[in-house]
Amino acid sequence: MLTAFLQYPVSFGDPAANFNKIRDAVDSEQFDLLVMPELCTIGYFHESREALFLYAESALDGPTAQFLLQLSADKNATLIAGIAERDGDQIYNTAIVVSRGRWLGKQRKCHLSRIEKLIFTPGDSLACFDDGICRFGVLTCFDLWMPEAARLLVRQGAQLLCCPANYGGPWTTQLARIRAMENATPLICANRTGVEMYAGAEATFRGESQIVGPMGEVWTCATEETSLGLSIIDPAAHVLKANPMCDDLMAEASRYALSGPHLK
């Protein structure tokens, strides 16, 4: 399968402008699965829950879901993209997963940064998706910092890990390679680019999206420019997790108990 990431400077608070950026970037491209950044249609640094609530939407049939459903049908592909999900009075940092015009589901971000805890409710479960070609899991940005989160998805049979992200520091770029290697599983990290204002200063998002192989090798990567990165992944090659030290890494990992994330 041909996999891809898309990074671009997200226009803050302007979903229509971001829809156009996405559509223009993929118009002449073909792929089977595309990962886009976290909160990729509204931006990251919202001042309060009340301010963010203006942009929060239904993960099932909100404007972004409708846009992605149509785009996935047009491209005959699976799309993964981050939104602010409204569910009653709660707002979740959520990745929508759609495939070829069908809604496959959503993955709420389980691990929130100190800034995010002021405006989002954390998710409390992690589960794989299957689009008929590949079984994959989704970890949003800071989720990737938890070794147990990636391991839980791989032990559920993930052949690929997908990470929508918004970060400015260098650490997540490095962590993506570690998570791929310690789980013998390819990983796609899609980070945004551009600048936003936070606490009266400019915050820069570094891009550097990448597709990483099962030994942490970088198959394709970007710099800070708008970029669509492509790489072929064979899901069947990543059912059994082997590395130079053992033939079945998950059999070794199963000696340790994992129960999944819990809310305090």
Image (cartoon, rainbow, N blue to C red):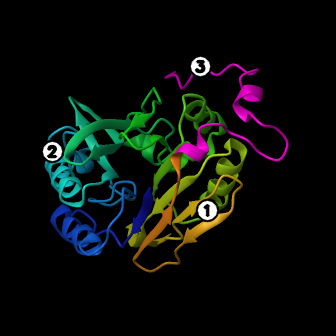
- The answer to which of marks 2 and 1 sits earlier in the sequence is 2
Where disc 1 sits, the SS reads helix
Mark 3: give few (<14), some (14-19) or many (20+) Cα within 10 Å: few
Q: Which residue is mark 1?
A: 173
Front-most of 53 and 14?
A: 14
Where disc 2 sits, the SS reads loop
Query: Residue 137: percent from the left, percent from the top?
Result: 48, 40
Q: Is residue 199 visible?
A: no
Amino acid of disc 2: Gly
Is 240 contained in the magenta span?
A: yes
Q: Which residue is mark 3?
A: 259
Q: CA distance from mark 2 to mark 1?
A: 31 Å
Front-most of 232 and 98?
A: 232
Q: Which residues are magenta?
A: 236-264
Side of 249 relative to 230 (left or right): right
Amino acid of disc 1: Thr
Q: Which residue is mark 2?
A: 62
- The answer to which of marks 1 and 3 sits earlier in the sequence is 1
Query: Residue 49: percent from the left, percent from the top?
Result: 29, 44
Is 143 contained in the magenta span?
A: no
Mark 1: give few (<14), some (14-19) or many (20+) Cα within 10 Å: some
- The answer to which of marks 3 and 2 sits earlier in the sequence is 2
Quadrant for residue 193, please give it. Answer: bottom left
Q: CA distance from mark 1 to mark 3?
A: 27 Å
Q: Residue at x 53, y 37 (%)?
A: 158
Q: Quadrant of the N terminus?
A: bottom left
Amino acid of disc 3: Ser
For the residues bearing labels 3 and 2, Cβ distance under 8 angstroms: no
